[in-house]
Image (tube, grey):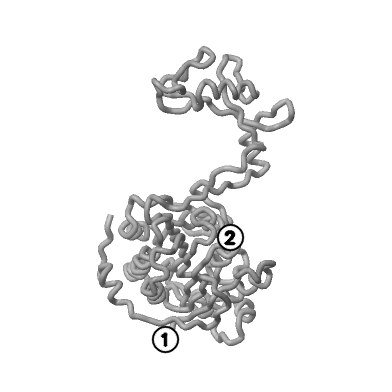
C-alpha cells in the first residue's frame, strides 16, 4: 500500500529541507543523558542526528502527535495559574493541520525517528480512528509491513451517552512497529483480579488451592521423537503430540499434577497461586486522567507498560511530542534515560514542573536523577 498526495517529498528532499540549528543549554543539572528540549521537533531531531551522539541509539519511541482534529487545546485557567505567572495565554497547542498536510507533517518526522532508532528499537504511534488508517499506511511505507507488530486498542474513557447517529467511541489506537525483527521484548503480565481467579481457575483442590486443567498434548504430529510415543498405553490424538516426554509426564503424575477424568483422559493441573498474571492482549484499558495537567495527557500506567515491555534499563526513550512529560516521568521511574521534545512553551513549563517534583520526591535524587533543559536557538 502506498499513499499518493500533493507535495509529497522524497526522503532526500525532507532531509535537505531541514535547516541546521543549534541547541542552547539553559539548565544543565548533571551529566545525565536525559534531556528536555524546547524546539521544533523536526529541526531538533535533525540536530540530534547530525551531532553523531544519537543516530541509531534510541531503543524506544513513543509519540502522541496531533490527531488532525482542527482544534485549539487549552489548559484550564486554574491549571495555567499554577504553572507560571509569565504565561499570559492558556493555549497549550493548536492541532490545525488537516488532510495530506497532516500526513506529510507526520511522515517527515517518522523518517528522522527511524534514523535515530537502534536495530533493537520499537515505536508506538498514538492516534485515533479518524486518521489512524492513513498513519498505518505511511508507517508501512517507512518501517515496512513486515515490521508491523500490533494495532492496539486503548480504552480511554467511560461510555458516553451522546445523541449522534453512531456507536459510542471509548477507544483510540496505538500502532506498534519495530525497526528490525530483533526488537526488545520484555513480556509483562497483567495481575489477576479475584474475579479473574474465580473465572479462570474454577476447580478447588482438597487443600483449597484453585486450579484449572489443560490438555497434555499440542498440535503437530511427531512420529520419531519421544513426544510422539505411547505413554501409559495411550498415544496422543491424531495430528498431535505430547507436550512433554513420557518420562516427564510420569514425573508430573507422581507429583499429583495430572488429573484423570472418569473416562481415563489425562490433563495437567495449573494452579492460580503459581501464575504471576496473564498476558496482555491487544485491547488495553488505561483511561486518561480525569483532571489532567495538560490537554490530551495520557495515563502514566499505559506508558510504564510500553516502556517496561519495549526497552531495558539505561535504554534511551524518545518522545518528540512530549507534551506534559508523562512519557519522561514513566521512563524516569523505570530507570531509563529519555529525550523529550516539544515546541509548546506551555507544555515545557508543565513538563519541567512535573519532572522537578519527581526529583524532589525521589529518595535517590543524589544518584543522577536529574535532566538537562535545552532550547533551540532561534
Residue 220, above or below 170: above
Q: Residue at x 70, y 32 (%)?
A: 209
CA gap between label 2 and label 1 equals 34 Å
Please indicate, yes or no, whether residue 155 appears anywhere in the rendered image: no
Residue 160, above or below 103: above
- Which disc number belongs to residue 334? 2
Label count reads 2
Q: Residue at x 50, y 61 (%)?
A: 315
* Residue 77 position within the rendered picture, expressed as x and y whole percent measured from the top left: 61, 79
Residue 209 appears left or right of 284: right
Indicate the secondary structure of the residue bearing disc 2. Answer: loop
- In the picture, residue 115 is in which quadrant? bottom left
Give whichever of 375, 291 is nearer the camera.
375
Please indicate, yes or no, whether residue 222 appears anywhere in the rendered image: yes
Between disc 2 and disc 1, the foreground one is 2
Earlier in the chain: of badge 2 and badge 1, it is 2
- Which disc number belongs to residue 83? none
Q: Residues within 10 Å of mark 1 (few under 14, many from 20)?
A: few
Residue 285 appears left or right of 123: right
Indicate the secondary structure of the residue bearing disc 1. Answer: loop
| Quarter of the image that includes the N terminus | bottom left
Residue 147 appears left or right of 338: left
Residue on which disc 1 sits: 378
Give whichever of 297, 61 is nearer the camera.
61
* Residue 137 position within the rendered picture, expressed as x and y whole percent measured from the top left: 33, 57
Give whichever of 331, 151 is nearer the camera.
331
Amino acid at each position: 500500500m502506498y499513499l499518493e498526495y500533493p507535495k509529497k517529498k522524497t526522503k532526500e528532499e525532507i532531509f535537505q529541507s531541514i535547516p541546521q540549528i543549534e541547541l542552547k543549554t539553559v539548565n544543565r543539572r548533571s551529566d545525565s543523558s536525559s534531556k528536555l528540549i524546547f524546539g521544533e521537533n523536526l529541526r531538533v531531531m535533525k540536530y540530534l542526528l547530525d551531532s553523531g551522539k544519537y543516530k541509531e541509539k534510541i531503543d524506544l519511541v513513543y509519540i502522541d502527535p496531533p490527531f488532525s482534529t482542527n482544534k485549539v487545546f487549552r489548559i484550564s485557567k486554574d491549571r495555567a495559574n499554577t504553572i507560571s505567572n509569565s504565561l499570559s495565554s492558556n493555549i497549550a497547542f493548536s492541532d490545525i493541520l488537516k488532510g495530506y498536510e497532516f500526513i506529510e507533517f507526520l511522515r517527515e518526522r517518522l523518517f528522522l525517528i527511524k534514523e535515530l532508532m537502534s536495530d533493537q528499537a520499537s515505536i508506538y504511534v498514538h492516534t485515533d480512528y479518524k486518521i489512524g488508517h492513513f498513519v498505518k499506511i505511511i508507517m508501512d511505507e517507512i518501517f515496512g509491513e513486515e515490521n508491523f507488530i500490533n494495532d492496539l486498542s486503548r480504552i480511554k474513557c467511560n461510555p458516553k451517552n451522546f445523541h449522534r447517529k453512531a456507536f459510542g467511541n471509548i477507544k483510540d489506537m496505538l500502532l506498534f512497529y519495530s525497526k528490525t525483527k530483533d526488537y526488545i521484548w520484555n513480556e509483562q503480565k497483567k495481575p489477576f483480579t479475584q474475579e479473574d481467579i474465580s473465572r479462570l481457575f474454577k476447580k478447588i483442590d482438597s487443600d483449597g488451592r484453585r486450579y484449572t486443567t489443560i490438555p497434555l498434548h499440542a498440535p503437530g504430529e511427531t512420529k520419531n521423537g519421544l513426544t510422539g510415543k505411547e505413554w501409559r498405553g495411550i498415544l496422543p490424538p491424531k495430528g498431535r503430540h505430547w507436550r512433554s516426554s513420557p518420562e516427564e509426564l510420569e514425573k508430573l503424575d507422581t507429583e499429583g499434577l495430572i488429573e484423570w477424568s472418569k473416562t481415563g483422559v489425562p490433563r495437567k493441573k495449573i494452579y492460580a497461586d503459581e501464575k504471576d498474571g496473564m498476558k496482555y492482549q491487544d485491547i488495553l484499558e488505561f483511561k486518561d486522567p480525569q483532571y489532567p495537567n495538560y490537554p490530551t495527557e495520557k495515563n502514566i500506567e499505559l506508558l510504564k507498560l510500553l516502556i517496561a515491555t519495549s526497552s531495558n534499563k539505561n535504554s534511551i526513550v524518545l518522545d518528540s511530542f512530549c507534551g506534559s512529560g508523562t512519557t519522561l516521568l514513566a521512563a524516569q521511574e523505570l530507570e531509563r534515560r529519555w529525550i523529550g521534545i516539544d515546541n509548546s512553551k506551555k507544555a515545557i513549563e508543565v513538563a519541567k514542573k512535573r519532572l522537578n517534583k519527581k526529583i524532589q520526591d525521589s529518595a535517590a535524587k543524589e544518584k543522577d536523577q536529574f535532566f538537562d533543559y535545552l532550547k533551540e536557538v532561534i
